[in-house]
Image (spheres, helix red, strand yellow):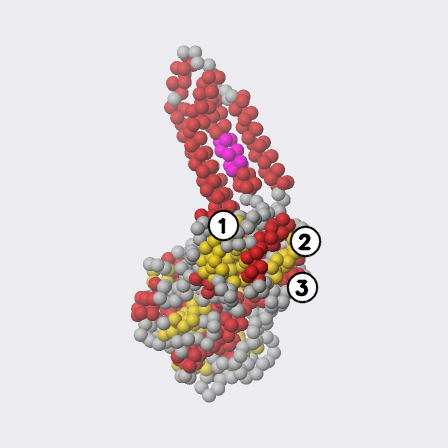
Amino acid sequence: MKAKMSIPVIHLSGEASSDDILSDRERKAAEHPVKVIAASTYNRVADALSLDRLTLNESDHAIAIRPMYTDYEWADYAGETITLDLPNGNVNLAFAGMTLERVLNWHYPDIMVVVADDTFRKLEAQVPTKQYVGYIVEDQKNTKETADALAAIQTSEMKLSTYYSVYRLGIENAAFNVFILGFLGVMFLLATGSILYFKQLTEATNDRSRYEILKKIGVSHKEIAATILKQNALIFLLPLLVGLGHYLIIFNWLRKLFGGMGGINLLLPILVCVGLFMVIYMTYYMITVNSIIKFINGESARKVRFAMFASAAVMVAAVSLFILAEPPVQYDEPHTGERIHITLPEPTGEMPVGVTELHLTDIDRADPWVKDRKRELMISIWYPATREVGQKAKYIPPNAAAFYDETVMPTIGVEPGRIDLSNIGVHASLNAPAEHGEKGWPVIIYSPGGSVPRSLGTINVQELASNGYVVVTIDHTYETTVVEFPEGRIETEQLPDFGADTVLKMMSVRVDDVRFVLDRLEALKEGNNPDHAKRELPEGLDLALDLSRIGIFGHSAGGATAAQAMYEDERIGAGIDMDGSMGYLPNHLLPVAQHGLDRPFLLMNAGFTDEGEVDPHLTAEDRASFWNESSGWKLDVAIPNGAHYTFTDQQYLLPQISSKLSLSPQVVQGSVGIVEPEQALAAQRDYITAFFDMHLKGVSQPLLESSKSPYANVEVLE
């Protein structure tokens, strides 16, 4: 560590003259979304980071720090103002400038302004500061262990953000995009060079008789070679200018996108890429010219041959110098030390929970995604148990967990082997005897989101089982990232390119899966064993099923599956869609979105629209149509400060991982928003359980009859 410094920051609410500067969405996302820094504090940190200092003397002026991942320019702030709310009267500040250089890491809402020292002291007299502690470390691109150590000692009051986690996520995403752009650029370059080469050689063949005439009237070989050089230079120059213009646009875009991330110098790699592309292109030019000269004169020009070899040497030298000047960041090897253990919250119901797995095979249906296979599914049945016995269930089977660990976890900045995914604490006994009560329990189907394994719905599933429900979770094979079958066989995602046809086929396949599972449950109820290998079932499981009361819920694509399955199968009496679009928008609505339902349905949404509004059935075409066409009981609730994966176990697991490892705030907030995990979890549990209690058990639920939610983070939408 090279330096440590304290950075006092004041958090305030307020309004801006432009919604682009401080939007309704940002004001709703945090009680105090504006971070205010004194000019002297900014300059002190800027000096330590070798950034440009700011000059700000007027007490009624402010300088904006451009929000990360935006392309705002000074023109967006010129003439605008921001009003800060204070206990003893508001303060109005006019923007006098904007800087790209940041002294604090990104954290949404990303609204930061620098004010004069006198102004800061006046604000500080009314509102206490929050102390940010910054550490400047050596070789910050390779500080994974340091970042994880800081994460491990943070308290609930701390909000840790490290350069390593933000840099790694940003640079990996940027590297992927640059690789794609670079690959396409090389392909375009090779195609262009080849086309020009054969075009010019063809024209030279047609013009050979004219060159022979020039030779006869005394034009020398040297003069002919010079003419060929000039003619082809003009032909090759135009595509080169277009390409350089393209790179200027790309460079400007990347500079805006990553300009606020310290330590990323885009100029050098861009210049190296452009230089290499030009060398390749000039080599094509030299090869073309040399071939034409050799064809016309009978021998190649010595200077042209020399230029060709020189171009190749320059290309090799440029690559070598770039690697020596900027060695690649050393990424972590798979973790082999002690693993981090994370747990799920205990269900709040009174009943212990049991779980068993079944391997189902639909002998009457060919698999729609893979040829020459019958449709196979893995399901888990969660149920009230007579008692806790024996072994606890695995969160994810071991081989599937290993695959998920190697392919998915690195995308959020967690190296393979760091977390024991298979042994995440599940509160259910494997194959425990089932408690069946007097007539069994209502049955609920759970369908996960696209590519998402069924295990990521475990928190809500356990909760329902502990409150007297049998819950059946389904992995939709070849659509889910990975599914593990008995004997350790795994099957991975095999979907074709994503588009309307794929999405609509997914929905059809998913609904068929759900209906097939219901058929197999009926067979189980009749005393048959639907498992492919006839593995022993938990005692009393058949008696625990009350198939006269069936519900369904799901997240994302699973939510759409819930709605469409209800539309096609009258056996299902109530359903919930958690943040799922009912079709491929905007032009391919599912039939259920077009015609609605006549049975109870609950819509649950998270996040905001692009306009900063809560995202309800009023703004989305699919849900608006569904809402208007549905004649059954319906309710729409939203968690505005959540995000798409708020309705999965990620809402609870990601903050837990972040408390032990250094994750980028962008990863956490992009997945589950900024809502407090415990609040979001409690609200989901109550609304989901209350909905099924009301419509499958006939128990009155005041929670569902109120137009105002008792949870501060939940809105009931009319």
Residue at 54 percent across and 25 percent down: it is 305
Residue labelled with disc 3: 338
The C terminus, quarter of image:
bottom left
| 7 in relation to 689, above or below | above
Taking the image as shown, residue 584 lies to the left or right of residue 305, namely: left
- For disc 2, the neighbor class at 10 Å (few under 14, some 14 to 19, many from 20) is few
Q: Earlier in the sequence, mark 2 or mark 1?
A: 2
610 or 546: nearer the eye?
A: 610
Magenta segment range? Answer: 274-284
SS state under label 2:
strand
Q: Earlier in the sequence, mark 1 or mark 3?
A: 1
Q: Give the image location of residue 417, x and y in percent.
A: 62, 61
Between label 2 and label 1, give the one nearer the viewer.
1
Side of 220 relative to 420 (left or right): left
Say which residue label 2 marks. Answer: 3
- Is 275 a magenta residue? yes
- In front of the other: label 3 or label 2? 2
Q: Is residue 229 visible?
A: yes
Q: Are marks 3 and 2 in contact (CB under 8 Å)?
A: no
Question: What type is the residue that disc 1 sits on?
Answer: Ala
Q: Residue furthest right?
A: 1
The residue shown at (60%, 68%) is 156
Q: Could you tell me which residue is drawn at 47 percent across and 48 percent down?
A: 74
Kindly identify which residue carries mark 1: 96
What x and y, as percent, mark residue 147? Answer: 64, 58
| SS of the residue under disc 1 | strand
- Amino acid type, residue under disc 3 in the picture: Glu
Q: Position of residue 717 (x, y in %)?
A: 39, 71
